[in-house]
Image (tube, coloured by chain):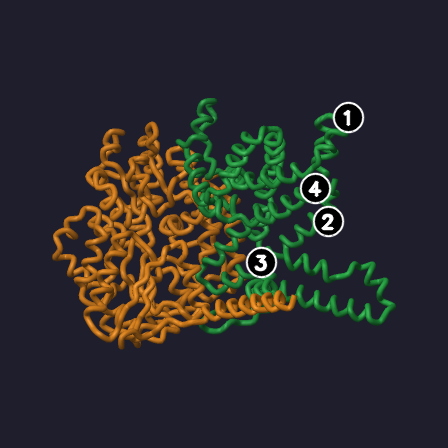
Chain colours: A orange, B green
Amino acid sequence: MPKRRSTFALVASALFAASLALTACGSGGTAKTQGGKTVVTFWQQKFEDYQQAWFKKEVDAFNASQDKVKVDYQVIPADTWAQKLQAAQAAGNAPDVQTTNYGNIAAAVAGGEIADLDSLMPASAFADIKDNVKSFVTIGGKHYAYPMLVEPSTVLYYRKDLVQAAGLDPNSPPKTWADLLTWAGKLTSGKVKGMTIASVGPDLGWSSWGLQYNACGHLPVADDWSKSVATDPCYAQLLNFYKSLYQSGDMPKTPKVGYADGSPYGNGEVAMMAGGSWVVGQLKASFPAMIAKTAVAPFPSIDGDPTKTTATLGGWTLTVDAKSKAKQQAAQFVNWLLAGDPAIMADFFKASGFSKYTVRSSVDQALASNPDATSDPFMKIISSQVVPYGKAEPAYPWDIALAFGTAIEAAMKGNLSVDAALKKADGQINDVIKKQSLAGTQPTH
Amino acid sequence: MALLESSAIDAPPAAGRQRGSGKGGTGRRAVGARRQDNITAYLMIAPMVILLGIFVMWPLAYSGYLSFFKINYYTGSKFVGLQFYHDVLTSDEFWHSLWIGFYYALLVVPIGIILALLLASFIKTLSKRVAAFMKVTVYLPAVVSTVIASVLFTFMYQDDGVVNWFLSLINLAPVAWLNDPQWALPAIAVPGIWLGFGITTLIVLAAMLDIPDSYYESAMLDGANFRQRLFRITIPLLRNVLLYLIVTGFALAVQMIDLPLIMTGGGPVDATTTPNYYIFSQFRSPDPYSRSYALTASLLLFVVLGLVSIAMFRLIRSDKAVDG
């Protein structure tokens, strides 16, 4: 009996010690130096495959270019990004450098999560950023991120061969929402639907920003974030447009993929598609046979006015963590990669199939001498007819965007009437404003 | 097992202890033996208590503490009292997600248990070899990953999928199963039932096999028909097992996240936003408010599920099994 008891005591002690050891494992920190070099951790959210290849090549080049800093490059899948980042922040192990989209910069600044880059990077780096993009990364007169690219969220892609077969003119794409509905009807034939556009709340939450601007000239929140303006009558027209398209049966009712994925168009399941400029890259990489049959155009406007916004300019930046112990070295890497030799970023845009757009004047000049860039038909149209009228993504909390996206979805699927859907969204947005005390907290540039 | 045996041998029966309490020597021996038993028992449960304390109790208590703060890892957390409890409890979306969770559970748990009862009754009548084959067949969905099942059923529900193909034979297709707010939740409940009913069937079958045949023989001699045997013998004697299946099945179903996450993204129009999916979506927002909000919502979900489980235990009174 005593022997048994001592065995149990031993097992209990061992388990206790093991649990303590496990607990201790979680409190370790990241090594900051390696072989005499300062280690800078860089987390990149996973994008298209060519981007990972490009980042890896350039990180290796940076590490080889000097002997003071070693960048530790890690790719994080998009669907686990938020969890991993929050866990790392809670443990004090957040990456020194991370990819941050424009829409999240204001929230990160408000939370004190990212460092002001003005004291860490030369002023000339910021002078090179195009004027319409500077405000995307500036809050209270300070730069908190260095921009990498912009990509319009909504462009119209259409099949020239099918358009011609339907008796329509491929050189005269639809100009108004009414034209688009007509085209979608005429192009629907058999299993091929005339059009596809976002139809689920989370996708509509962000992909419709451009059309929200198009319909009303503003987003459904007052400029000072004090109240919702979702019940403005102009939004009823927007919801009716989406509803007509969905209920006409001219778009797939059960989309296989999300809005960001252009494969339904690439696979020939639809004749027209609303998609981001990044779909150009996807078509070139995965559906090259479709390139010759495809044309792009600005997404139609509510009244045919081509100068009205139809797309927001989304995109990615690099930011430096506010608690980083190697801020200067982290900023050195950001400066080398995004603000240094224009040939580095020119190479990126070439790798993207010119589906994304530069934010620096010097990179524009580098691309001007590249015949591939200047002759690309998609780039020419998007950069001259869509980007100049594009607006920044909103900085307000995602809950607001989701409430409005869900209202569009409810109207499309007949859950609620257009007016009831807008009224519900109005109440939800006001609830978010009240609970999160948003009034007057809009970022100032 | 060895320890249980030794404890049983060392510990005098309760009646013996009472009888010996008046005699000094015997009483001291009894008290000493009881103390040794207690020490052994405490040692036995100590590892589990310690592990539970570190990995369950402490995180739970700390979560409760943190729910009074607006958590910020950079500028320091700010005490806000019960603000997040107020915000969650006055949120229509939170209550809507709870309703979706309960609706999903109501679809999945009763149907799963009825199917399991029917199938287990059928398997019980089969020969040993055929029953073994059936048991393996029925159990197979339980070893299929939820992710694989989700993808499989997503393809089946497409406009040109097999479900709509069958419906097209009677001119009822296509139904937008996953994109119609009316159908989306029942559509994801089907894989939910399919994934769970294998284990449920085996548990019910095991419990059924424990019911002595003599009960049925006596009932049949008294002229009881199938319905009477089912409701007077089988179901009453399965009460404890059914209670276990209902309570655990309900708690698991309300917490379902995988199927809506993969198949519908919580849509259409929040029709499949279960409580855990709602909390997860909140947690993924980058702002500090959502972080604290998600934490508080998860604590309140814990309370709601606990209360529902207690109510179920009360409603379906659990008795000790009567051994035949």
Local SS, label 4? helix
**Dot placed on the residue nearer the N-terminal end, 2 or 4:** 4
Chain of the residue where label 2 is placed in the rendered structure: B
Label 4 to label 1, Cα distance in Å?
24 Å
Local SS, label 1? helix
Chain of the residue where label 4 is placed in the rendered structure: B
- Relative to residue B230, is residue B142 drawn left or right? left
Query: Hey, what amino acid is under mark 3?
Result: Val
Q: Where is residue B262 in the image (x, y as percent from the top left)?
A: 44, 46
Which label sits on residue B221? 1
Q: Position of residue A127 (x, y in %)?
A: 24, 69
Which label sits on residue B314? 2
Q: Position of residue B213 (x, y in %)?
A: 70, 33
Label 2 to label 4, Cα distance in Å?
13 Å
Local SS, label 2? helix
Q: Name the residue under label 4.
A: B239
Q: Mark 3 points at which residue?
A: B88
Q: Position of residue A62 (x, y in %)?
A: 22, 67
